[in-house]
Amino acid sequence: MIDVESALKFYRVMAYVVGVMLLVLCVGMVVKYGFDDDAMVAVVGPIHGFLYMIYLVGALNLALKVRWPIGYLLLVLLAGTIPFLSFVMERSVNERVRKLITATA
């Protein structure tokens, strides 16, 4: 279970980081299209993309360890692309995995 707990911790950190970066990217999009300045998007966009790939790997790692159904996994993977959803899914994932850990302990 230690391996699952470390995978959960990594996933939770990445969910927050990707969620925050997505919100910053959304602000950058408003600045780009509202004020005709694309500098913020040019910097934040690739950073969010790179961090999202790490998030995908972390979520997949956790999913394989706890054997999520494919539908739930897809929802978790997509959560990093919709503003605020990564925070909601992080909470759902945390509760789901914690229940599994306590049930097997």
Image (tube, rainbow, N blue to C red):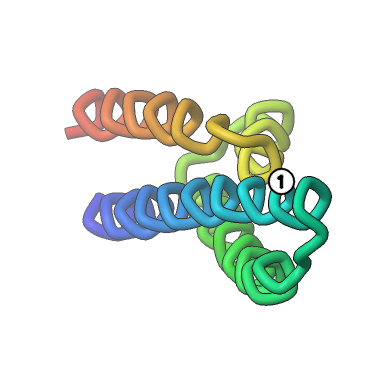
Query: Residue at position x 76%, y 65% from top?
Result: 37
Q: Return the x and y of residue 59 as percentages of the image width and height.
A: 55, 51
Give the amino acid at mark 1.
Val
Query: Residue at position x 25%, y 50% from top?
Result: 1
**Residue 73 visible, this orientation:** no
Q: Is residue 101 above or below residue 23?
A: above
As drawn, is 90 to the left or to the right of 104? right
Q: Is residue 104 above or below residue 14?
A: above
Q: Return the x and y of residue 26 as percentages of the image width and height.
A: 66, 46
Q: Return the x and y of residue 63 as percentages of the image width and height.
A: 55, 45
Front residue (pair 100, 20)? 20
Front residue (pair 58, 80)? 80
Tag 1 secondary structure: helix
Q: Is residue 53 above or below residue 103?
A: below
Residue located beneath label 1 in the image:
30
**Dividing the picture into quarters, in which one does residue 72 lie?**
top right
